[in-house]
């Protein structure tokens, strides 16, 4: 879902000749496997082709009626895209917790947001984490707007790692 939303926003920026952004609202900082899934974001369109000062959550307002139901995403229980046992890992290094696309499809975030040449977001399988396995998918976004979904290898966590059954006196 997150990967598709990023592609959609890039396409919308080019098609509408306006900036679009993925506003990251909530990430799962702890990744505690015993805790419910977390993660939320919004799909937004700017008021200009560059330097937008106002952002409208999709669908873009054309009739004067405020309706943002289509552009709100949540992995939480009873959320729009509830995903049991799946969390969006807390991101770091993003100005304003947002990824902004220019009308040319480029990512217009500052260079400091591109650690190792990419902006990276990770989605984590918390059910696997509870079994001592780190299983995640990472979305890597280049300055050019190229977006790649990388399915990570399942990594067995060492005994005693947080959330591993039987570790730490559980």
Image (cartoon, rainbow, N blue to C red):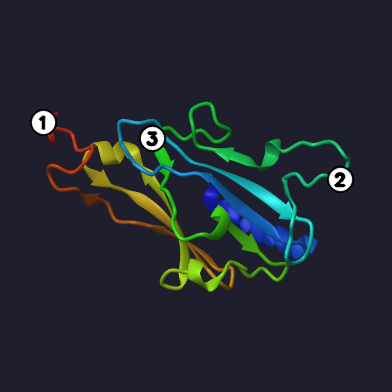
Q: Quadrant of residue 57?
A: top right
Which residue is disc 2 drawn over?
Answer: 62
Which residue is disc 1 drawn over?
Answer: 169
Which residue is disc 3 drawn over?
Answer: 85
Residue 127 in the image: above or below residue 147 = above
Please say if the residues under marks 3 and 1 sit with CB atoms less than 8 Å apart: no
Q: What residue sits 26% from the left and 36% below the top?
A: 130
Q: Earlier in the sequence, mark 3 or mark 2?
A: 2
* SS of the residue under disc 2: loop
Report x, y in % for residue 53: 74, 57
Q: Earlier in the sequence, mark 3 or mark 1?
A: 3
Report x, y in % for residue 151: 38, 56
What separation in Å lies between label 2 and label 1 (alpha carbons)? Answer: 58 Å
The numbered mark at residue 147 is: none
What separation in Å lies between label 3 and label 2 (alpha carbons)? Answer: 37 Å
Q: Earlier in the sequence, mark 2 or mark 1?
A: 2
Q: Residues within 10 Å of mark 2 (few under 14, many from 20)?
A: few
């Amino acid at each position: 879902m997150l990967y598709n939303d990023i592609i959609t926003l890039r396409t919308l920026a080019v098609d509408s000749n306006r900036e679009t952004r993925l506003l990251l609202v909530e990430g799962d900082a702890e990744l505690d496997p015993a805790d419910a899934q977390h993660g939320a974001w919004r799909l937004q369109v700017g008021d200009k082709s560059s330097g937008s000062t106002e952002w409208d959550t999709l669908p873009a307002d054309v009739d004067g009626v405020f309706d943002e139901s289509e552009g709100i995403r949540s992995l939480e229980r009873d959320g729009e895209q509830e995903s049991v046992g799946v969390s969006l890992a807390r991101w770091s290094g993003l100005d304003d917790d947002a990824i902004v696309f220019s009308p040319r499809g480029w990512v217009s975030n500052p260079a400091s947001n591109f650690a190792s040449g990419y902006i990276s977001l990770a989605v984590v399988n918390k059910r696997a984490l509870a079994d001592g396995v780190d299983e995640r998918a990472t979305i890597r976004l280049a300055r050019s707007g190229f977006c790649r979904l990388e399915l990570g290898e399942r990594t067995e966590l060492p005994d005693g790692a947080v959330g591993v059954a039987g570790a730490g006196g559980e």
